[in-house]
């Protein structure tokens, strides 16, 4: 199969949404010989911070000498980003070979798998083929009924920050959402970011029921020294002067969670030194999350796509740019809580440029611009293409200004490509 044929098969409309459950993934993996049974995992669920926490853990585990798989979603530029081993993406040839192997089984299933279930099965086979010592496995949606939850007890279960998102699937309150995420807890050690008392109680109860040791991040150990547009520097006792090249003000907290999870793994016998932790965090690469992709003007690309994430982004923008008014390049999904999200950033805005991400769920650029004009009374201009949106936002900001592109991970790759074209033309 060619690259296009492989992706066309994976993204085929025949893998339509079904009632949530694990039976289809289990059936598909059984046909493959249950590759997931021969692997070890660090399993990560939560609302925000999953990707950066996963990338941080994977980077440290590589430094410790372990062959490390990383499974994340969505991707920014290439589908292959979703499954990596030791920082290298699956190749087109490897992906095509596994799809050829799995295709007869998937096609024969009476209850066909969803696209994500199919991808999860592909990833499990890939990680086994690559002889991974450990796989850092990010949940797709929720936890309990997510297809990644077919695995047995992980080496560590990691719960990142909890907020309101995907309420149509997970519940309309924080405890309901936390309960769905807590489904990955099943007897092994648990590292939890912490949060509201009602959220913490959900995880404390689940850990008691499953006899799972729980460690909530001890924030008294965290001391942030500096954060600029290149990195943040912090201590997390007893580790000193950690330089993390992720610059959102929330990133030291995600790193603290990653360290806490790694410490739990170390207690289980994984050989991870203090220096591995410091060096691994220094080398983390996680694109599209408060990432500075240009300097004239400063151009920040951020994947915040729910109210909880937008609030964290707004705090980072305030920290970095103080009272400076910003130009926002926005593209959002129509099913998001748009008014709550925009309330967080509107006070920071000089003007808005709106575009429509390449996704069926995306809000039309003109509709978003009208909403922003009507609600906040600030200039909001729609553009038909990402390239035009980037060009206009840069023009509005001027060489000494700041552009912030956010609202959806689905347009991050297109934004990056548009900015790169401008940089190459200089």
Image (tube, rainbow, N blue to C red):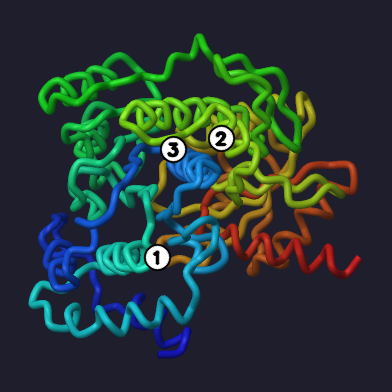
Residue at image mark 3: 48
Does residue 7 show up? yes
Mark 3 or 2, closer to the camera: 2
Residue 317 vertical position relative to residue 100 in the rendered view, above or below? above
Cα separation between marks 3 and 2: 25 Å
Does residue 305 show up? no
* Label 2 crowd (10 A; few <14 / some 14-19 / many >=20): some
User: Where does the N terminus fall, quadrant-wise?
Assistant: bottom left
Q: Residue at x 47, y 38 (%)?
A: 53
* Label 3 crowd (10 A; few <14 / some 14-19 / many >=20): many
- Please say if the residues under marks 1 and 3 sit with CB atoms less than 8 Å apart: no
Q: Which residue is drawn at 41% across and 19% down?
A: 217
Asked if residue 159 lies left or right of residue 320, the reply is left
Q: Where, by quadrant of the figure, is residue 47 drawn?
A: top left
Q: Which residue is drawn at 72% across and 43% down?
A: 351
Lower position in the chain sequence, tag 2 or tag 1: 1
Q: Residue at x 47, y 59 (%)?
A: 85
Mark 1 or 3, closer to the camera: 1
Cα separation between marks 1 and 3: 29 Å
Cα separation between marks 2 and 1: 23 Å
Residue at disc 2, secondary structure:
helix
Residue 37 vertical position relative to residue 229 in the rendered view, above or below? below
Residue at image mark 2: 276
Residue at disc 1, secondary structure:
loop
Residue at image mark 1: 130
Residue at the extreme left: 110
Closest to the observer: 46 or 14?
Answer: 46
Lower position in the chain sequence, tag 1 or tag 3: 3
Lower position in the chain sequence, tag 3 or tag 2: 3
């Amino acid at each position: 199969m060619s690259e296009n044929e492989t992706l066309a098969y994976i993204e085929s409309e025949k893998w339509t949404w079904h009632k949530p459950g694990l039976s289809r993934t289990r059936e598909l993996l059984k046909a493959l010989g249950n590759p997931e049974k021969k692997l070890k995992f660090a399993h990560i669920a939560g609302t925000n911070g999953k990707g950066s926490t996963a990338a941080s853990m994977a980077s440290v585990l590589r430094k410790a000498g372990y062959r490390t798989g990383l499974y994340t979603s969505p991707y920014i530029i290439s589908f292959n980003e979703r499954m990596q081993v030791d920082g290298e993406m699956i190749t087109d040839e490897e992906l095509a070979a596994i799809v050829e192997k799995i295709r007869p089984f998937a096609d024969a299933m009476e209850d066909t798998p969803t696209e994500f279930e199919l991808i999860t099965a592909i990833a499990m086979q890939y990680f086994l083929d690559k002889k991974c010592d450990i796989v850092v496995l990010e949940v797709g949606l929720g936890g309990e009924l997510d297809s990644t939850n077919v695995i047995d007890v992980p080496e560590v279960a990691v719960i990142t920050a909890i907020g309101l998102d995907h309420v149509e699937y997970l519940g309309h309150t924080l405890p309901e959402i936390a309960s769905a995420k807590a489904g990955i807890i099943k007897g092994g050690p648990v590292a939890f970011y912490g949060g509201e008392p009602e959220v913490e109680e959900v995880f404390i109860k689940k850990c008691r029921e499953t006899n799972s040791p729980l460690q909530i991040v001890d924030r008294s150990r965290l001391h942030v020294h500096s954060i600029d547009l290149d990195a943040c520097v912090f201590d997390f006792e007893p580790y000193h002067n950690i330089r993390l090249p992720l610059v959102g003000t929330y990133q030291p907290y995600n790193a603290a969670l990653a360290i806490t999870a790694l410490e739990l793994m170390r207690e289980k016998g994984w050989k991870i030194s203090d220096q591995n932790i410091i060096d691994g965090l220094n080398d983390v690469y996680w694109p599209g999350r408060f990432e500075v992709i240009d300097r004239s003007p400063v151009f920040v690309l951020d994947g915040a796509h729910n109210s909880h994430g937008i609030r964290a982004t707004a705090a980072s923008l305030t920290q970095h740019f103080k009272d400076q008014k910003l130009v926002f390049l926005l593209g959002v999904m129509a099913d998001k809580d748009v008014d709550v999200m925009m309330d967080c950033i509107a006070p920071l805005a000089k003007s808005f440029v709106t575009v429509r991400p390449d996704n069926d769920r995306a809000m039309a650029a003109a509709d978003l611009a009208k909403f922003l004009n009507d609600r906040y009374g600030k200039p909001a201009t729609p553009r038909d293409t990402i390239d035009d949106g980037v060009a206009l936002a840069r023009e509005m900001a001027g060489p000494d200004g700041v552009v912030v592109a956010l609202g959806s991970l689905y347009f991050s790759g297109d934004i990056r490509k548009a900015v790169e074209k401008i940089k190459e033309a200089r």
